[in-house]
Image (tube, coloured by chain):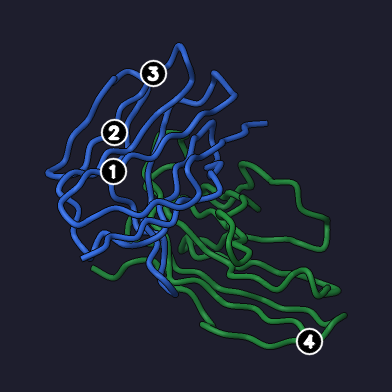
């Protein structure tokens, strides 16, 4: 089955700096890669996704890149704000979502 | 429009009991998936249903079962509860049952086993 690894497990950045989270996946059949943000005690919220026929996608301060050959994808958050503090999960889909272990992002004011 | 709704929000059970969790998908969505999220970890896939048929099952014992109703709502049943079943159970809905469809999560049911 699919195995998704996510790094780093924790990330502390100064407000206004950028944050980068990296994930690798194992199953070449996966063709859909969403990212979720989960605040404490709340539901995972879909923030951006990318399909395997696209190399990069951007939505305001958030961007995701995908390298199919290397089987890795990354989330980039620019101009971080305190409200970006949360746990971020990457996932890969071969019909079900297989999640990474999560990255706890803390934005220091 | 309402998002994915789950009930109950919290549940306390003892070992050996049985539990039923409920999920209503976003209006128009025909696929429902269930995930278990243990504290500090990412969600783990349990089941996917599409048009009332099981489309996939994760690595969970037969104590876990589910079904989807004609109105696309779903129930997750867990029998013979163990302490290790304590977790947040999340339901996600998507428009179709295809692998590249966005899945939207409910707030979950927090299950505690004593």
Respond whether the residues carrying marks 1 and 3 are from the same subunit. yes
> Quick one: SS at disc 4?
loop
**Disc 1/disc 3 C-alpha distance (Å):** 16 Å
Identify which residue is drawn at 53% across, 64% down.
Answer: B90
- Give percent across and percent down for residue A99: 53, 45
Circle 3 Cα neighbour tier, 10 Å, few/some/many (<14 / 14–19 / ≥20): some
> Quick one: SS at disc 3?
strand
The image's mark for residue A48 is 1
Left or right, A87 with reference to B51: left
The image's mark for residue B114 is 4
| Disc 1 versus disc 2: nearer the observer | 2
* Figure chain in green: B
Asked if the residues shown at circle 2 and circle 3 are in contact, with their CB atoms under 8 angstroms apart, the answer is no
**Disc 1/disc 4 C-alpha distance (Å):** 38 Å
The chain holding disc 4 is B
Query: Closer to the N terminus: mark 1 or mark 2?
Result: 1
The chain holding disc 1 is A
> Quick one: SS at disc 1?
strand
Respond whether the residues carrying marks 4 and 2 are from the same subunit. no
Asked if the residues shown at circle 1 and circle 3 are in contact, with their CB atoms under 8 angstroms apart, the answer is no
**Disc 4/disc 2 C-alpha distance (Å):** 42 Å
Asked if the residues shown at circle 1 and circle 2 are in contact, with their CB atoms under 8 angstroms apart, the answer is yes
- Give percent across and percent down for residue A33: 41, 34
Identify which residue is drawn at 31% across, 62% down.
Answer: A85
- Give percent across and percent down for residue B91: 51, 62
**Disc 3/disc 4 C-alpha distance (Å):** 45 Å
For disc 3, the marked residue is: A67
* Figure chain in blue: A
For disc 2, the marked residue is: A64
| Disc 1 versus disc 3: nearer the observer | 3
């Amino acid at each position: 089955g699919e195995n998704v690894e996510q790094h780093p497990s924790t990330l502390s950045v100064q407000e206004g700096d950028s944050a980068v989270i990296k994930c690798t996946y194992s199953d070449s059949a996966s063709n859909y890669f969403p990212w979720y943000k989960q605040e404490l005690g709340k539901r995972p919220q879909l923030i951006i996704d990318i399909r395997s026929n696209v190399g990069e996608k951007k939505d305001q301060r958030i961007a995701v890149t995908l390298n199919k050959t290397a089987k890795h994808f990354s989330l980039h958050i620019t101009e971080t704000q305190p409200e970006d503090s949360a746990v971020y999960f990457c996932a890969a889909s071969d019909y079900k979502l297989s999640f990474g272990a999560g990255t706890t992002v803390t934005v220091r004011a | 429009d309402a998002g994915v709704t789950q009930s109950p929000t919290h549940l306390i059970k003892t070992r050996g009991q049985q539990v039923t969790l409920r999920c209503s998908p976003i209006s128009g969505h025909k696929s429902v998936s269930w995930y278990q999220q243990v504290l500090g970890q990412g969600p783990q896939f349990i089941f996917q249903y599409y048009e009332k048929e099981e489309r996939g099952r994760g690595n969970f014992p037969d104590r876990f079962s589910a079904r989807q109703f004609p109105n696309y709502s779903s129930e997750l049943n867990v029998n013979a509860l163990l302490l290790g079943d304590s977790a947040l159970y999340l339901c996600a809905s998507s428009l179709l049952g295809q692998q590249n469809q966005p899945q939207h999560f409910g707030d979950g049911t927090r299950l505690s086993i004593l």
